[in-house]
Amino acid sequence: MSDPNLVTAEDMAWFTDNPGIWVWEEEGHIGGFSASDTRDGTVWALFVDPAQEGRGIGRSLLRATLDTLREAGHLTATLSTGPGTRAEQFYRKAGWTVIGHSAKGELVFQSPL
């Protein structure tokens, strides 16, 4: 995340106490993590260590995150990310659709579950 101050103590407490955080770990190294927000059906975070890209970690974490949202009863998932980023390319390749822009100018993506 470009601004860690955007993650509040309340955010951390909620995500710690609820389902939806997934971590990819190999031999003591964190290769990536994801978090879904079951309250609103969003993919709240998905990050992969750049040194680990191209190994399917992001796809696996995204699948687990979307499964969590589906199990919580959501029919679609949404997320936002900056335009022109590797993340934008990742979600487009995964079949997500841009449905608009956020107030911060990020692309808002949606995918059926």
Image: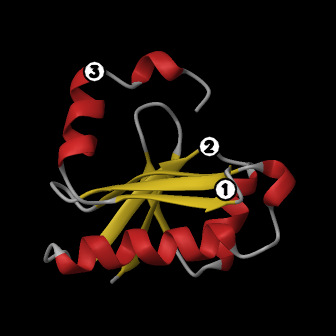
Disc on the earlier residue, 2 or 3: 3
Quadrant where the N terminus sits is top right
- Distance between the Cα atoms at labels 1 and 2? 8 Å
Quadrant assignment, res 64: bottom left
Q: At which x and y percent is residue 2?
A: 62, 26
- Residue appearing at x 19%, y 56% in the figure: 40
Q: At which x and y percent is residue 63?
A: 48, 78
Kind of residue at disc 2: Gly
Quadrant assignment, res 21: bottom left
**Residue position for label 2:** 82
- Residue appearing at x 13%, y 77% in the figure: 73
- Residue appearing at x 35%, y 82% in the figure: 112
Foreground: disc 1 or disc 3: 3
Examine the rendered structure and indicate whether residue 65 appears above or below residue 70: above
Foreground: disc 2 or disc 3: 3
Disc on the earlier residue, 1 or 3: 3
- Distance between the Cα atoms at labels 1 and 3? 26 Å
**Residue position for label 1:** 87
Contact between marks 1 and 2 (CB within 8 A): the answer is yes
- Distance between the Cα atoms at labels 2 and 3? 24 Å
Kind of residue at disc 3: Ala
Quadrant where the C terminus sits is bottom left
Examine the rendered structure and indicate whether residue 61 appears above or below residue 16: below
**Residue position for label 3:** 9
Residue 75 appears anywhere in the view? no
